[in-house]
Image: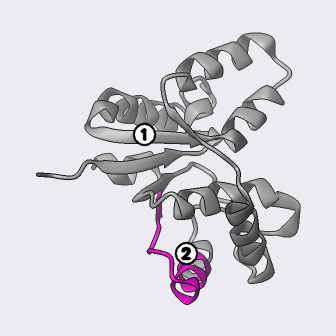
Amino acid sequence: MHKRIRVYLDTSVISALFDGRNPERQGLTREFFEQMETFDVYISEVVLAEIDDIRDAQLKNKLINAAISFEILPIDEESRRLASEYVTQGAIPADYSEDALHIAISTINAIDYLLSWNFRHIVKVKTRRIVNMVNLSLGYSDLKIVTPAELIY
């Protein structure tokens, strides 16, 4: 039996659906959402907390409605420890610990692909290299960190 690909969406992917400032990114995100039924899709309590921090009530409701059908992964002590290790090793700056938590929760839950549009801290070679070095050294599986476009094309 063929195993479905497990993907984790960080907040940037969900918010890109409604962000017209970058039409290409918005279009690619919509394409991913159109193909989403072929994947097992997850978000986490981190995503919900980030959505909750949005001040624009109309935008917040749009994001909640877009995210409501995904399985929600918890923040647990193991993911906090792993996120801390990513920060310690320089994968993610200490001021952006939520980004490290997205990665750690994905790793702990054996997610195949973490999808993000966050090029500053998540979708970059340095982050991928350090995350997978840490994962290997601690006995976790390799995590593929990509944009939605990389997964659908």
Image x and y of residue 128, in percent: 55, 73
**How many numbered discs?**
2
Instruction: State the residue in front, 45 or 50.
Output: 45
Can you say whether 29 is above or below 129 in the image? above
Badge 2 density bin: few <14, some 14–19, many ≥20, Cα 10 Å: few
| Above or below 41: residue 27 | above
Q: Residue at x 63, y 63 (%)?
A: 104
Mark 1 and mark 2 in contact (Cβ < 8 Å)? Answer: no
**Residue 25: percent from the left, percent from the top?**
50, 38
Amino acid type indicated by mark 1: Val
Nearer to me, 71 or 11: 71
Decide if residue 142 is on the left or right side of residue 49. Answer: left
Can you name the residue that lies furthest to the front here? 77
Please tell me how crowded label 1 is: few (under 14), some (14-19), or many (20+) other residues with Cα within 10 Å.
many
- The mark nearer the N terminus, 2 or 1, is 1
- Residue 125 numbered tag: 2
Residue 73, given in percent of the width and then of the height, sits at: 58, 44
Please determine whether, in this image, residue 152 is positioned above or below residue 110. above
- Label 1: which residue? 41
Query: With 117 as the anchor, is 151 left or right in this view?
Result: left
Region rendered in magenta: 130-146
Relative to 55, 21 lies left or right = left
Q: Single out the residue that lies furthest toward the bottom.
A: 137
